[in-house]
Amino acid sequence: MAARARSEERRAEIVRSALEVIAERGYRGASLAAVAERVGLTQQGLLHHFPTKEALLVAVLEERDQWDATPSREWRLDLLGSLVEYNAMRPGIVQTFSALLGESVTDEHPARDFFTRRYATVRGEMARMLRAEFGDRLPSGLTPEQSAPLLVAVLDGLQYQWLLDPEAVDMAEAFRGFLLLLQGPSSD
């Protein structure tokens, strides 16, 4: 039992180190040797926990999703604002996700299938959330299904802008402004 707990702790430490290395170098520039060195293991020791670079990448992506919008979670618009604020407190995670997302659009990237599935799921969840909030039509007249990809694009686009110029882009404030746009004209 204690050996299993140590193994799980070591795996978590490896994933955290991989997050850091990928954030610094991108997936293609991140080597297993660099991750092993960061965590204080030999490359062979790292391979004991993650037999391939792709297996480590999947663990990194799954870990990131545990912290955010997993499909089992029921999201509301006000909770999305909290998620944006939370992301602003963890730039390394946002940077890693953004680097992997950007790289994943290339052919044969090992994260491509993950992101393709993830975005299909997230768009579906966002459409359900928008339908619960607004019904079959948003104040703009768009359906939740038409609006969901736009909502996801704003979330991810804000992350890129914030990473590039955090002094000029306040993610949380900008997202609150976007939520006002979704809600339409105020009745004041």
Image (tube, helix red, strand yellow):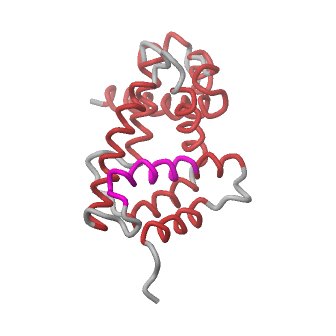
- Which residue occupies the foreground of this view, 124 or 168? 124
The number of discs equals: 0
Residue shown at the point (47%, 25%) measured from the top left: 57
Q: Is residue 138 above or below residue 45?
A: below
Q: Which residues are magenta?
A: 142-157
Residue shown at the point (51%, 17%) measured from the top left: 107
Residue 54 position by quadrant:
top left
Q: Position of residue 165 (x, y in %)?
A: 72, 51
Residue shown at the point (48%, 31%) measured from the top left: 15
- Which residue occupies the foreground of this view, 4 or 49? 49
Name the side, left or right, on which 59 lies relative to 2: right
Report the magenta stretch's main SS.
helix
- Which residue occupies the foreground of this view, 146 or 164? 146
Residue 154 sits inside the magenta stretch? yes
Q: Position of residue 176 (x, y in %)?
A: 52, 68
Residue 142 position by quadrant:
bottom left
**Please, which residue is most extreme toward the front here?**
141
- Which residue occupies the foreground of this view, 72 or 33? 72
Q: Is residue 96 above or below residue 105?
A: below
Residue 117 sits inside the magenta stretch? no
Q: Is residue 13 above or below residue 107?
A: below
Q: Position of residue 161 (x, y in %)?
A: 65, 49
Q: Quadrant of the N terminus?
A: top left
Q: Position of residue 164 (x, y in %)?
A: 70, 46
Residue 49 position by quadrant:
top left
**Please, which residue is most extreme toward the top here?**
44
